[in-house]
Amino acid sequence: MESSDESQKARDPAKIVQAIIIAAIVLSAAVIVYVIYSRSQEAETEDLAQVASGDMVTLNYIGRLPDGRVFDTSFLDVANDDVIYPKSLSFSLRSNDSYEPFEMTAGNYGPGGTIKGFALGVIGMRVNETKIVEVLPEDGYQIYPSLLVTKNLVEEMPATETLTAAEFEAAFGVEGALLVVVPHYFWGWDVMVTDISSGMVTFKYMPTVNKTYYPYGNPQTTGNPQGWPVVVEAFDSAGFGGNGSVTIRHMIQADDVYNIEGTDSDGLTFYLWAFDSTNSTFVIHKSDSSIGYNAELAGRTLYFEITIVSVKSA
């Protein structure tokens, strides 16, 4: 048991006050250190270069469609990862060394620059900052109306076609000869040569009613699914003034918009762009690589995840 003197010593007020003062000093010092650190971090952030129009900017990016699919990126790991980063129909891998930070002039759009929404979207960003830039259709890739084609879901066409002898051989891979039967170069059904005169080859279609054909590409092709089924609904040998007619139905629906690509009879890749159930029509939007035109991106809202790497002031 403690003595009365020892108990009094343990409760000495002077020592209690001293302990409180020491604790307060330690706490104050910690607060001061935190404030100094926070202010230094704020100052460091303020010192980071901010992008202004005309600056040379180096950045990384991931470009996405409205449904989240990636159509382009500067990151090799993103390009190679189809699980976390599912890809758009038009996405294609480049050489590994091409995946590197992108350099551009901020605010410079049009010829020699980027699309408007991208060029202006980086202005005001700082080094190491990451931001999602929304590019509206009017500030992105513009539509070429000449590359939009409207088709009927149910389509009737003449069953007779005429080509020059050279065109026939180029299309079918054989020389035109009377009564020769070969698969059509686009539709896939058989045709028979019925007339050859003055350097021209005339042939008639011989489709099988109720049979399915894949003129735009086969959606069941492993690794490269394209197009959709086309079913022959009718064949009238007397239609179109005796030239014959074929009636087909395109087996597509509204959910296929932006989810189908194919190749048209002119050899251009296209994307299903619109579907009108009221008028029973649909629209395909053709790409043209010769002019760098990607129909999957034209006229759409796009999203770019941008990270600024460096800024060189103008």
Image: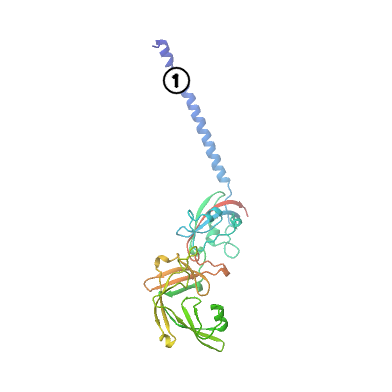
Q: Is residue 280 visible?
A: yes
Residue that sits furthest to the left in the current view:
278
Q: How many marks?
A: 1
Q: Residue at x 51, y 32 (%)?
A: 30
* Vertical comparison of 169 with 12: above or below: below
Which one is nearer the viewer's eye here, 146 or 243? Answer: 243
Query: For mark 1, what is the residue?
Result: 16
Quarter of the C terminus within the rendering: bottom right
Which one is nearer the viewer's eye here, 126 or 259? Answer: 259
- Please provide percent x and percent y for residue 226: 47, 67
Left/right placement of residue 249 relative to residue 223 reads left
Q: Is residue 103 visible?
A: no
- Please provide percent x and percent y for residue 294: 53, 66
Q: Residue at x 42, y 66 (%)?
A: 256
Residue that sits furthest to the bottom in the current view:
198
Which one is nearer the viewer's eye here, 185 or 137? Answer: 185
Residue type at the position of mark 1: Ile
Quarter of the N terminus within the rendering: top left
- Secondary-structure class at tag 1: helix
Q: Quadrant of residue 174?
A: bottom right
Q: Residue at x 53, y 34 (%)?
A: 33
- Please provide percent x and percent y for residue 88: 49, 61
* Vertical comparison of 238 with 135: above or below: below
Which one is nearer the viewer's eye here, 192 or 161? Answer: 192
